[in-house]
Amino acid sequence: MVKGAMAGKPLIRIAVVASDPLRLVGFRALLDSESGFELVPASLPELAGLQKADLALLGSRNIHNLFDLMASLKAARPNLRIIVTGSGDEETILKAIVAGAKGYVDEAASPAEFVQAVRVVNQGSVWAPRRVLSMFIERVSSAPGRIFPAGRVTFTHREKEVLEMLVLGRSNKEIGSPLGIGERTVKAHVAKLMRKVGVQNRLALSVHALTHSLVVAK
């Protein structure tokens, strides 16, 4: 019986790529010591169709096409929460989050921190190293021409829809399709959002939205 199943709480099912046996054994040993988790080994091709998984753990060190894989996973399973693990620099971590990862855990993190990250992401929040969020805020606040709005920024309903999908790492085309608008219109909305918030690019806009709770993490 899976540990934690008797507690009556739903298990958090975590997909891990099985092609890295050492990594798989490490995660299994870690999660077996905690209650409420079920490890689901899978190959890379199987990940997108793995309906029973709540989260997917991707290692940035051993997956060269990490961002392409994330894009395909998000397209097939929009609600699948992805946690990236590795030893990437701040830029890589930020890109992973903007591309759709809900969390980034350093491979040097303690077991307790890793478990906390999984629980936080499973609840719908974003997990990233503090140094990354600090750099995020510092970069946005010190950017040339940065002007913080005097009051809370207000958005139209359509701007909120665009911002929510942009934070999920969607492209203009991926944002426009479900909303029934063209890529040029999406681009115009994004430009207006950047002006309202006072940032210079999409990455800074996504970071600002997350760090200032302008959107609800899904």
Image (spheres, helix red, strand yellow):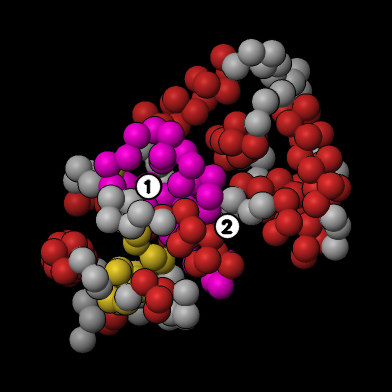
Quadrant into which the N terminus falls: bottom left
Which secondary structure, mark 1?
strand
In this figure, which residue is indicated by the disc labeled 1? 104
Q: Where does residue 41 sit, x and y in percent of width and height? A: 28, 76
Distance in Å between CA atoms under marks 2 and 1: 16 Å
Instruction: Name the residue rendered at 66%, 48% in the picture.
Output: 166
Q: Where does residue 57 sit, x and y in percent of width and height? A: 34, 61
In this figure, which residue is indicated by the disc labeled 2? 218
Three-letter residue code for mark 1: Tyr
Judging depth in this view, the residue of 78 and 91 nearest the camera is 91
Q: Which residues are magenta?
A: 76-105
Please give left or right for residue 131 compared with residue 164 in the image: left
Please give left or right for residue 165 compared with residue 16 in the image: right
Please give left or right for residue 5 compared with residue 102 in the image: left
Q: Where 201 sits versus 71, above or below?
A: above
Please give left or right for residue 112 compared with residue 45 in the image: left
Q: Where 64 sits versus 77, above or below?
A: above
Total of numbered circles in the picture?
A: 2
Tell whether label 1 touches label 2 (CB within 8 Å): no
In the image, which is nearer the foreground, mark 2 or mark 1?
A: 1
Q: Where 91 sits versus 164, above or below?
A: above
The magenta stretch spans residue 79 = yes
Which secondary structure, mark 2?
loop
Q: Which mark is residue 95?
A: none
* Among numbered discs 2 and 1, the one appearing first in the sequence: 1
Three-letter residue code for mark 2: Lys
Judging depth in this view, the residue of 36 and 50 nearest the camera is 50
Instruction: Name the residue rendered at 36%, 71% in the picture.
Output: 44
Q: Where does residue 132 sit, x and y in percent of width and height? A: 41, 32
Instruction: Name the residue rendered at 52%, 21% in the picture.
Output: 139
